[in-house]
Image (cartoon, rainbow, N blue to C red):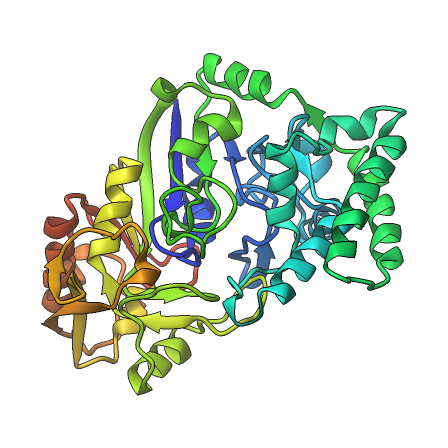
Amino acid sequence: MVDAILGLQWGDEGKGKIVDFFAPQYDVIARFQGGPNAGHTLYVDGKKIVLHQIPSGVFHAGTINLIGNGVVLDPVTLRKECQAVAGFGADVKKNLFISHRTNIIVPTHRALDKASELAKGNDKIGSTLKGIGPAYMDKTGRNALRVGDVLDKNFDTWYQQLRQKHLQLLGNYNFDEDITQWEAEFFEAIEFLRTLNVVNGEYFINDKISQGKKVLAEGAQGSMLDIDFGTFPFVTSSNTTSAGICSGLGIAPQKIRDIMGVTKAYCTRVGGGPFPTELEDATGEELRKLGSEFGATTGRPRRCGWIDLVALKYACMINGVTKVIMTKADVLDNFENLQVCTAYNIDGAESQEIPFQMTRHKIVPVLKEFKGWNTQTSTIKEFSAVPASMKTYVEFINKYIGASVSHISNGPGRHQLITVA
């Protein structure tokens, strides 16, 4: 049996905490896509840690964590992460496993990412410059190095062949930065990677399922950044939706049970791209301040706005969401009034559908106003104690998107999570 937790917006929904909360109920936590551009913020014994590639179940003794083949792995970042989690008592040599088929980010991928983004000028997509896009391009171009390759005596030769190809491409960009330090760190990290548990991921996870083990698939980024269904071209390079679970782990669709989608009580976005409900005013700044809306990976300030139900309903539809988990509801505690987007006015016509290419239209959100609860909710433990106006807000969202909020997060702590039903 496989359940999933994934994001329903533009990432940064607070998935790490949610996975960390549910992890004790599962035997295996598996990342199925994305790379070190993801940042899942957790609080362990009151201390903050950000995970970029290691699944968020790593702090639970007895829980197996798998990095699946759909991920692009940066060995340098992985090594640093392993050192960080060891400081919290996690034993990665015991509970972290990596699929042979997981693709590797090499130093020249990072260089290509930077060169490509610089060449776009004012049309930058907001890449984190971690090499994710070029790594996925090599995967689909059938040039990639994979984790299983590091165990082969020919790895250095294959690396040099890929490096030479990349240097030719970099020449087209007139990119001449010295990456020798990146390469020194990379090969140190490769030696470390060879000491970890590398497995045939698809056999590994299906064997666990056949044993009756409970698996939780952990998504990175958000549905609106999906390479196929997101706000293209301002998207990530992988399938962030539930469809990516099967190809990113090697499991069959009928093995999947619950799809738990995570959404903030409002909206944020990092980097460029369309954002219909963005608030470029004092209200948006207040949301950013109260929500500490700065990227876990990059530190960039997030763009903030009201919740977009058109996009949220779309994300629930394409994912087959069975439960919705709403995070950061407490950030709205101080607002007298709240707005939700119920439709788009697209070039003068009202619609409740996401257009094919959002960047080619003038989109004005149609907003519905709600009375705020204007009281502190961070200490609430039971849904019965939730303010009536918050219940009204949640009930309207449930009805609109056709899926029900099962939990409300009212703070960053692991147990600040209210069960709705």
The quadrant in which residue 1 appears is top left
Q: How many marks?
A: 0
Q: Residue at x 10, y 50 (%)?
A: 399
Q: Which residue is drawn at 82% across and 55% down?
A: 182
For the C terminus, give its image quadrant: top left
Q: Is residue 410 above or below residue 354?
A: below
Q: Picture coordinates of residue 95 (x, y %)?
A: 64, 33
Is residue 387 visible in the rendered image? The answer is: no
Q: Is residue 159 above or below residue 37?
A: above
Above or below 387: residue 317: above
The furthest residue to the bottom: 282
Nearer to me, 1 or 367: 367
Residue 163 percent across, percent down from the top left:
82, 43
- Residue at the image point whose x is 39% and y is 40% from the top: 241
Q: Nearer the viewer, residue 348 or 421?
A: 348
Reply above or below: 340 against 397: below
Residues 181 and 333: in front is 181
x and y, in percent, of residue 38 in the image:
54, 53
Kindly identify the residue that appears in the image at 81 percent across and 45 percent down. Answer: 189
The quarter of the displayed image where residue 361 is located:
bottom left
Q: Can residue 405 be seen in this view?
A: yes
Left or right of 227 in this view: 76: right
Q: In this view, does 227 lie to the left or right of 318?
A: right
